[in-house]
Image (cartoon, rainbow, N blue to C red):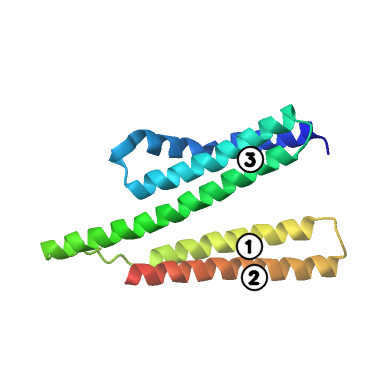
Amino acid sequence: MTHTVLAIGTAALTASGCVWYLPAIADLQAGADRPRSTRTAAAACVLWWAALALAGGLLLAVPDWHPAAQVALTGLVGGAALRLRAARDRRGEQREGAARWAALEAGPVPRSARPAAPALVGWLVVGAALASLGAVAVLLSAGGGLASRVALAGVSGAGVALAFLLVGLGNARRQGR
């Protein structure tokens, strides 16, 4: 694969990453309006994506791929270090918030108990619909014999339905607390 193809792929990946780095840039521009942990995590995100963009540019400019890989690895390591610091800062902010609530002798506002049944039914309906659509798609595919398609449709449909059931039950349990 040529460097041009890798550079184009990197550019496409970097462009699609705007859903992460544009909000991170907004968090950095907000400054002190955001908690320190949020700003540090945003800096990690921007560093990751900037390193990837720079690596893509190096793939076009330099005939060897090693400098691009080194830049990408440096961005990855630096971003991971910033992300770990953001997690540490976040824990400190949570402890500070808990201490402030304790000083006020008041706890957080209790959540109102919402019935869990409608949410569970919603998860089950969506899961059954997706499982059915997936099973029909497998049955209508042209690959393999009819028996293998029926078995695959049944197993995959049951797996999708089970996954949605488990997520719905977990959601209902969290709402019941």
**Which image quadrant: the N terminus?**
top right
Res 20 visible: no
**Left or right, residue 174 beside residue 154:** left
Q: Secondary structure at mark 3?
A: helix
Q: Which residue is label 2 attached to?
A: 158
Which numbered disc, 2 or 3, marks the residue closer to the eye?
3
Residue visible at 42% across and 66% down? 171
Residue visible at 74% across and 30% down? 62
CA gap between label 2 and label 1 equals 7 Å
x and y, in percent, of residue 64 in the image: 78, 36
Q: Secondary structure at mark 1?
A: helix
Q: Which residue is label 1 attached to?
A: 131
CA gap between label 2 and label 3 equals 45 Å
Of residues 152 and 9, the one nearer the viewer is 9
Of residues 54 and 165, the one nearer the viewer is 54
x and y, in percent, of residue 80 in the image: 52, 52
**Left or right, residue 32 beside residue 64:** left
Give the residue type at disc 3: Val
x and y, in percent, of residue 61 in the image: 72, 27
**Left or right, residue 116 beside residue 20:** left
Q: Which residue is label 3 attached to?
A: 71
CA gap between label 1 and label 3 equals 44 Å
Tell which circle, 2 or 3, labels the residue nearer the N-terminal end.
3
Tell which circle, 2 or 1, labels the residue nearer the N-terminal end.
1
Say if 25 sits above or below 103 in the image: above
Q: Secondary structure at mark 2?
A: helix
x and y, in percent, of residue 56 in the image: 68, 34
Q: Are marks 2 and 1 in contact (CB under 8 Å)?
A: yes
